[in-house]
């Protein structure tokens, strides 16, 4: 885990509206960053709140936005590592590194989508179709099966194999 | 990757992974467990794909409001400045520390009766007490009856955050801020501990550090009493 935030850097937040609005805008980036990794709103909200709680003592009116952002993202990475580690019951060093979005900074809108598309395009056709329909278009397994002329059970296995293959490409990318 | 016929094990794994995928796509929490660890790379990839659907998602208005409330409260309570001071080693968390005093136990009066001994005499345990000056008794909106035995309940009395713990007929108040770094503790029912998310340190219900290899000072006590009707009051700001 890389993200033990820098000790000793003291920052604080002045009370009141504009500072909180600024903090919330930074946390929007954090939320997008986390959502791109956990893939669901409920967990993304929990983890963003954890980041906010950890970061509050260090949010500082005078601090450079870049320093605040770096701190928030370091914290977000550490919170995410804890999340996966708790889910799989494994120490963080046995978890896949951040496969999909390599930048430690908030990506411009759509960057993770582009990366996903790049990786999907390198998959065999049937794998790419399953993942596109299921994830990007939100088809149910049954709908994917009908579209591809396969059984639900067959699509379920194909989905798993496609995810494994995509994971491998993500690791190699 | 071979496209051969799946064995029963692969079919079972495919089913488990699909259940997780369904949850993700519906915006539900990820319920992966250690049984899914073998497919962790596929699952992390699925999460990234599900996340990519929304491109650059914004927080929902409701969540944003909750977060704003949280930040606002922290700022209004001045906790932010004080915590910063603590990080710098410049100050103390709240009120007068260093007094020789006990965890305060609010004696349980009969409902409707204001207890005569609202503050128990201090006992020489060496524990610091949170005594903001000026301070006041704050009704924390919880009735004694609602306090589950041995389950810490997080309350706020102005700037003072506390866990209230009922053991039998006594209620103890502990500061909700870790005695190491100024982080808010979280109750973990599974381990029966108050856990600090900042450095993964923990305290038991008595406020004592549980890691013998890395002992931390006890959590300061927070004063608590039982007022009329069994309502709990905490000495805060």
Image: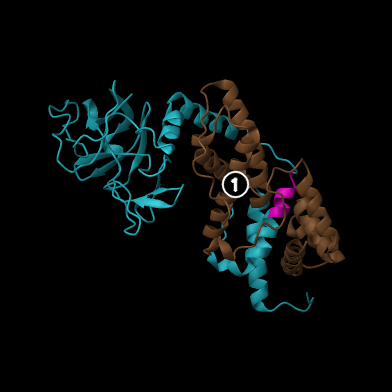
- The chain letter for the residue carrying disc 1 is A
Which chain is represented by brown in the image?
A: A
Residue drawn at 60 percent across, 36 percent down:
A68
Residue holding disc 1:
A74
- The spot of residue B130 in percent (x, y) is 28, 33
- The spot of residue A42 in percent (x, y) is 59, 45
Residue drawn at 67 percent across, 72 percent down:
B11
Nearer to us in this view, A141 or B27: B27
- The spot of residue A32 in percent (x, y) is 67, 42
Horizontal side of B34 relative to B27 (left or right) equals left
Nearer to us in this view, B88 or A158: B88
Image-quadrant location for residue B184? top left
- The C terminus of chain B sits in image quarter: top left
User: Which range of residues does the magenta coloring cover?
Assistant: B48-54
Which chain is represented by cyan in the image?
A: B
Residue A147 position (above or below residue B66)? below
- The spot of residue A89 in percent (x, y) is 52, 63
């Amino acid at each position: 885990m890389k993200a033990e935030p820098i000790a000793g850097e003291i920052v604080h937040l002045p009370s009141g509206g504009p500072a909180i609005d600024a903090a919330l805008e930074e946390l929007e980036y954090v939320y997008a960053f986390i959502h791109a990794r956990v893939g669901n709103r409920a967990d993304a909200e929990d983890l963003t709140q954890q980041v906010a709680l950890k970061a509050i003592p260090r949010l500082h009116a005078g601090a450079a936005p870049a320093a605040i952002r770096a701190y928030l993202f370091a914290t977000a990475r550490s919170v995410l590592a804890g999340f996966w580690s708790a889910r799989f019951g494994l120490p963080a060093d046995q978890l896949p590194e951040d496969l999909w979005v390599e930048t430690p900074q908030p990506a411009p809108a759509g960057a993770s989508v582009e990366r996903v598309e790049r990786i999907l395009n390198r998959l065999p056709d049937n794998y790419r179709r399953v993942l596109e329909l299921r994830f990007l278009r939100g088809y149910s397994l049954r709908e994917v099966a009908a579209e591809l002329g396969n059984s639900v059970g067959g699509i379920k296995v194909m989905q798993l194999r496609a995810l494994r293959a995509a994971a491998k490409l993500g690791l190699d990318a | 990757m071979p496209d051969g016929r799946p064995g029963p094990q692969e079919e079972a794994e495919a089913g488990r992974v699909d259940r997780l995928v369904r949850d993700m796509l519906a915006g539900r929490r990820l319920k992966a467990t250690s049984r899914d660890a073998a497919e962790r790379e596929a699952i992390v990839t699925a999460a990234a794909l599900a996340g990519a659907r929304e491109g650059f998602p914004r927080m929902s208005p409701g969540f944003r409001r909750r977060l704003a409330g949280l930040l606002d409260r922290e700022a209004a309570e001045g906790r932010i400045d004080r915590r910063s001071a603590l990080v710098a080693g410049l100050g103390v968390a709240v009120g007068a520390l260093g007094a020789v005093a006990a965890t305060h136990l609010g004696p349980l009066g009969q409902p409707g009766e204001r207890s005569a001994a609202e503050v128990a005499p201090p006992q020489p345990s060496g524990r610091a007490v949170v005594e903001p000056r000026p301070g006041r008794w704050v009704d924390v909106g919880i009735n004694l009856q609602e306090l589950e035995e041995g389950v810490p309940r997080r309350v706020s009395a102005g700037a003072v955050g506390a866990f209230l713990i009922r053991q039998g007929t006594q209620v103890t108040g502990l500061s909700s801020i870790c005695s190491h770094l100024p982080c808010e503790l979280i109750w973990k029912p599974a381990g029966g501990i108050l856990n600090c998310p900042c450095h993964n340190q923990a305290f038991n219900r008595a406020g004592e550090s549980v890691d013998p290899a890395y002992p931390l000072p006890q959590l300061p006590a927070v004063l608590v009493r039982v007022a009329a009707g069994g309502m709990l009051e905490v000495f805060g700001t």
